[in-house]
Image (cartoon, rainbow, N blue to C red):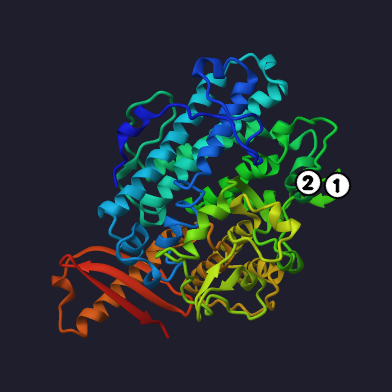
Amino acid sequence: MKIYHWIIACCLLLPLGGCSNWLDVIPEDSVDEKDLFSTGEGYRNALNGVYRQMSQTSMYGQQMSWGFIDVLGQLYNTQKLSNYSAYGIAGKNYAYRDETVKSVIQVIWSNTYNSIANCNNIVGRITGEDPSKFRGGEAEQHMIQGEALALRAFLHFDLLRLWAPAPVTNPSGNYMPYFENYPSTYEPDKSVQEILSLVERDLLQAKNLVAPFDTLPDKSMLVAEKRIKNNWVSSSVTDLFFLYRGFRMNYYAVIAQLARVYNYMGEYEKAAHCAQEVLDAYAEEYAAVCFQLSKKEEVQNNDRKRYKEVIFALSNELNLDNYEPYYTTSSDRLVLAGYPGIFDDEADVRKEYLTETSGADRICNKYILPTNNTLEYTQTEDLIPLIRVSEMYFIQAEYLYRKGETQAAIEQLDQVRVARDCTKGRLTVSSLDDFKKILIDEARREFMQEGQLYYYFRFLSVRLNRLKNKLLANYLRNRGNDLATVRISAFYIAMLSNNSFICKYNIFFRKYELSVTIL
């Protein structure tokens, strides 16, 4: 899919400022761009504006988390989706050219590139600024620049994962531009490898820029208990702008994103090294690991988003309102597909996320206010998790398995599963395909309504392509057709929780749907 290059020409800085959530620290206001960047406060405001836009429903506040992307990932029962809505049309048929679906895609594209443009405006202007403009001096200046660079990389990477072929398919074409300047009206499309190289470059630079602030003075703001609660106090920084920095694009969020990118690139050793750095993050001042797997008791106390293990997140104070129509009256009720087979262990605490709607239907309740509301939930109801520490364990596991250290790989996965109250030692792996299936199953459970499942399918597209060909050949053979005479115009394969696959493809531009159980 080609990018709409004209989008960037239309990008202007958002009305910046905020409301009462933790991303917004100054009164809501719209200011002239020249005036905005005349002070360090203006740069703070501009950076908050990027986070704010990313949290809206057109991006990670819905479509790029629990909405459109999870529909594509077959997280939901497509039969419960309207035949006439974007979710129903995309989920059932993958009809990207349908006008209803295109409207959703276009908004995702335009707002993502608008956010990228705003990042570029910050990066372009802050370079060479007088450090005295900033209350935190040069450290703050570099921190803001690093965050903007990291967010630029983060956004480009997600667009790449969404619409360009995965690196494992050895794609040869050019698929999308990488915008580095503001303003910019046109950039040529680049290859997957070129985009990934630029993403890596920006993240490495961002890492070095934010490191002095996040790792050298102290790590107080990154301790789990401190980064979510309003009682964080540091002897070095008492400025409210830095409150909740533990969920923003801080040093370890950058490193975690690097781990994700390297894993996608097939640079498994580099990915594992970055993942381990995140797992090893330790705040000496509090004798505490920064990013911890949540305990069963915490989840049962309505810590549905498991905030201790969230590395990077956004915030939207309207989460509850935005999600409410999709579990009550909407024709697009987001009912989980494959329940109860999603879970392979009855004791799995992640089942606490599910709530009965009608009959056997189940929905995810991460964005539903609990009846027995608790402090744990009210502190995180605005939270939109985007990277969590369990992904670091999965990355480590994949590296170890590809090294031939099967047992060590399983032990990494078991660390996450034991934290979810699953029985240790139940996983068995006999092949790389088995291991990939386990990763997909865990992603379905672990990142429910966080927009990650679809990416796991795309990342594993080589194996799925081979399976598609086998299933399609059998399907046609049973009907007396010669595979060689059949033209495939599109396809998609998704792995279901009961070890079956649903294969969607076009034959002679007529739509067929096949469900096959692999014994």
Q: Which mark is residue 226?
A: 2
- Circle nearer the N terminus (2, 1): 2
Indicate the position of residue 9 as horizontal and vertical percent values.
35, 27
Instruction: Report crowding for label 2: few under 14, some 14 to 19, many 20 or more residues within 10 A (C-alpha).
Output: some
Query: Height in image: 334 above or below 157?
Result: below
Relative to 339, is 214 on the left or the right?
Answer: right
Q: Amino acid at mark 2?
A: Lys
Relative to 164, is 511 on the left or the right?
Answer: left
Indicate the position of residue 56 as horizontal and vertical percent values.
50, 44
Mark 2 vs 1: CB contact within 8 A: yes
Q: Which mark is residue 286?
A: 1
Indicate the position of residue 79 as horizontal and vertical percent values.
37, 72
Q: Which residue corresponds to the image point at 54% horizontal and 53% vertical from the top-left?
A: 321
- Per the image, label 1 sits on a secondary structure element best described as loop
Query: In this orientation, which residue lies closer to the viewer: 345 or 215?
Result: 345
Q: Residue furthest left?
A: 485
Dividing the picture into quadrants, the one containing residue 416 is: bottom right
